[in-house]
Image: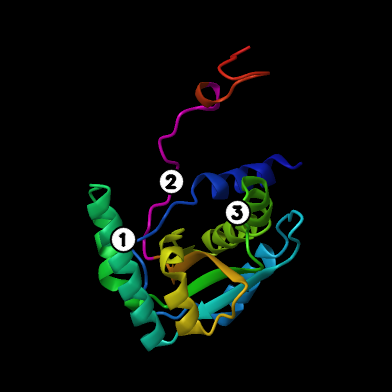
Amino acid sequence: MDDGLTSEIDHILSTARSVRRKLDFETPVSKQDIEACIDVAVQAPTGLAGENWRFVVITDAELKSKIADIYRDVLLQISQSRNVTLKSSHHALMARLHEIPCMIMVFSIGEPGIEAPGQLAFYGSILPAAWSLMLAMRARGIGTTWTSLLSSRSDEISELLGIPSGVTQTVMLPAAYTKGANLKKAKRQPAREVTYWNGWLQKD
């Protein structure tokens, strides 16, 4: 592979941060950009569940406001129940989520079942597409953050959006063009600290 292409891909992968601030709330995200990103997303690998992805793009102000209210309630409840202090960026997003140009919700036709292997196979066919969608937006200067909090209130979301039974909600990606966001590598443990060879805790 071309070294320049490898470097470019590595850069996008390494700087795909959650963006909750420095977002352009006034400029709509173009339909062309959204569909181009989804075209990338549906090239993701799948498991046994196959190509069961569906994407719902929400731009209606009333729907966004209702979803933002649910998101805020869930996040505050989790913070209180787990005694977790929310970051200032979480508060910033909560305060203006209803103004976000669009929300993209990723659904999968079918249900994961109750056994772990079935759940792994089911989500393994949808979450790679959601991640590819986030990366495609990153490459186009669209900021977003991965959130699955709304799945705890999936019945309400389904009622708002007319989602039929037998369709599983996964993640929601609030999306806006970035305004001066400095996306860079995060401080993470290096591979040698988190990788074992031929057995648990085996370093050689």
Badge 3 crowding class, 10 Å Cα cut-off, few under 14, some 14 to 19, many 20 or more, is few
First to last magenta residue range: 179-192
- The x, y position of residue 172, in whole percent, is 48, 66
Q: Nearer the viewer, mark 2 or mark 1?
A: 1
- Look at the image and tell me whether residue 29 can be seen: yes
- Classify residue 67 as left or right of residue 9: left
Residue type at numbered disc 2 = Lys
Q: Does label 2 or label 1 sit earlier along the sequence?
A: 1
Is 5 within the magenta? no
- The x, y position of residue 27, in whole percent, is 41, 79
Q: Nearer the viewer, mark 2 or mark 3?
A: 3
Residue identifier under label 2 = 184
- The residue positioned 27% from the left and 48% from the top of the image is 82
Rounded to the nearest whole Å, what is the CA distance between mark 2 and mark 1?
Answer: 26 Å
Is 187 within the magenta? yes
- Classify residue 15 as left or right of residue 63: right
